Amino acid sequence: MGLFITNFPQESRYNFILLTQNKFLLNLEESNMLLFRLFSKLPLNVLFIFSDLFYLLAYYVLGYRKKIVLSNIKHAFPEKNDVEVLAIARNFYRNFTDSMAETIKLLTMSEKELLRRFVTKDSDLVFDNVDKGEIVIGMCGHFFNWEGHLVAASSQVSNKCETIYTKLSQPFFEKLLKSIRCRFGAILTERKSFQRTFLRNRNQPRLIVLAADQRPNLSDIRYWASFMNRETAFFEGGEKLAKKFNNKVIYAHTSKPKRGHYIFEYQIIGEPPYSNHLAHSITDKFIALLEKNIRDSPSLYLWSHNRWKQKKPNK
């Protein structure tokens, strides 16, 4: 085989090796996807056994981002003692690994089971308005299991659901999450092209889902507000678009009554006319609801994210 390759001109040898490598990586990716699908066929209660093992590994052995998690919780709840902080942290890691099992299951979970496990309340605030030809903007926080919430919502509005997301750097997991999120026809739009896409489709009725608690990039215009006892930077893209194009804005309060089951209660945080609204009114309302949700269910929030890495610049 080596002699056969060396008989090619140098450029042809390079192209042959590149083609062989790409084919190998493609086959490997397809094999990995098949393995995930087969794994996803297992009952969720079986997948939770793996979750329990990953919890022990992540919390007790690897200490995955444990320093960030404990620091974030301590800053957010200065009134809690060390025992209470550790209890929130342990429950966070359990929810974190459970969400991994649940997300894998989303690859093949039936729509009936999906809607039984991920329940939306007052969803007419979204779906009825989309059916009437409106755009509804959903400003969400990173509560477990946000992937299940997204898939459940998209199953009820099909291709009228657009999610704004940040592309993953690892191609396989990017493809895997796209397969999960787009199962029922949802549309994914990268954050960097969102405003351009919105303007192009501003008359197309749909639910637009924004993870509005993400840390803005340094180049982004941001709004600083007090959040969980610290000055925090927020995106204001959702508010600016809602006020400019008279769109309704909703928030989903998240709770977890038992393992593998979630409830998302929708409420309006902004609706036109906006002529008498103060600046930042929608974002401030979102922050207040987000903080209340965290205080109601602290272990459901994504504490491993280095949310407060940025510091407010001195004027």
Image (tube, rainbow, N blue to C red):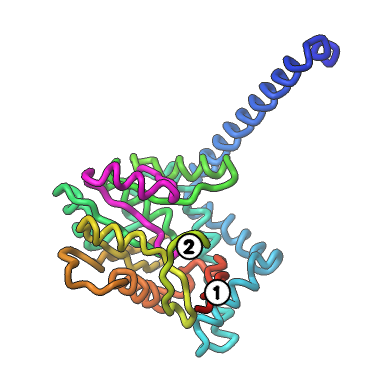
The secondary structure type at the circle numbered 1 is loop
The residue that appears at 39% across and 76% down in the rendered structure is 291
Residue 237 % position (x, y): 36, 59
Q: In the image, 61: left or right of 157? A: right
Which label is found at residue 311? 1
Is residue 314 positioned above or below 270 on the image? below
Q: Nearer the viewer, residue 263 or 251?
A: 251
Q: Earlier in the sequence, mark 1 or mark 2?
A: 2
The residue that appears at 65% across and 27% down in the rendered structure is 22
Quarter in which the N terminus is drawn: top right
The residues colored magenta run 187-213
Residue type at mark 1: give it.
Lys
Residue 143 visible somewhere in the drawing: no
The secondary structure type at the circle numbered 2 is loop
Q: CA distance from mark 1 to mark 2?
A: 12 Å
Q: Which residue is mark 2?
A: 216
Residue 238 % position (x, y): 33, 60
Residue 260 % position (x, y): 43, 59
Task: Please tell me how crowded label 1 is: few (under 14), some (14-19), or many (20+) other residues with Cα within 10 Å.
Answer: few
The image shows a total of numbered marks equal to 2
Residue 297 % position (x, y): 42, 74
Residue 94 visible somewhere in the drawing: yes
Say which quarter of the image contains residue 108.
Answer: top left
102 part of magenta stretch: no
Residue furthest right in the image? 3
The residue that appears at 22% across and 55% down in the rendered structure is 245
Q: In the image, 220: left or right of 290? A: right
